[in-house]
Image (cartoon, rainbow, N blue to C red):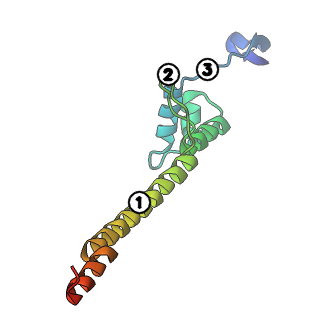
Amino acid sequence: MTSLKFNLSEGGNEALSEPERRRRRSVHEKLAIVQETLEPGVTVLEVAKRHEVNPNQVSAWRKQYQDGTLAPLNTGEALVPASQLAAAMNEIRELQRLLGKKTQEAEILKEAAEHTPSPSSDCALHHSALGRL
């Protein structure tokens, strides 16, 4: 894309045509810019002007940050959106709760089995009561 810049110095009024350069920002730079917008009393527009970035781009980075998709990656790590992470954490908590409940039920059944005579011992008791053992 080409932008026009005007040379107004020395009374000049000529248009200079030069290619517009896009600057690629690292994830760390984007995070720093987003962090600035999260400060109290600071607007996206102020931060965007300070860093010479379109305010819409800064807003998009903020949304990515809030979704959990704007984060530096270590080699081999997969990026998981915050919503998926929250759902997985809820599922883990629910499974832990169910495991605790089942463990408690198993303990109750084990204790009940220890205090309940077995059918063979009932038979032996019955026979001994009759004097047959």
Residues under numbered marks 3 and 1 in contact, where contact means CB atoms less than 8 Å apart: no
Front residue of 25/55: it is 25
Residue 126: quarter of image: bottom left
Q: Earlier in the sequence, mark 1 or mark 2?
A: 2
* Amino acid on which the number 1 mark rests in the picture: Leu
Classify mark 2: residues with Cα within 10 Å, few (<14), some (14-19) or many (20+): few
Within-10-Å neighbours for mark 1: few <14, some 14–19, many 20+: few
Q: Dot 1: what SS?
A: helix
**Disc 2, SS:** loop
Distance from disc 2 to disc 3, alpha carbons, whole Å, reads 20 Å
Q: Which mark is residue 75?
A: 2
Residue drawn 47% across the image and 25% down it: 74
Quick check: 111 left or right of 24?
Answer: left
Q: Residues within 10 Å of mark 3 (few under 14, many from 20)?
A: few
Instruction: Label 3: state its secondary structure.
Output: loop
Which residue is at the far front? 132
**In percent of the image, x 77 and y 11: which residue is there?**
16
Q: Position of residue 93 (x, y in %)?
A: 44, 57
Q: Which residue is mark 3?
A: 24
Q: Nearer the viewer, mark 2 or mark 3?
A: 2
Q: CA distance from mark 3 to mark 1?
A: 49 Å
Q: Nearer the viewer, residue 104 or 127?
A: 127
Residue that label 1 marks: 99
Nearer the observer: mark 1 or 2; the answer is 1
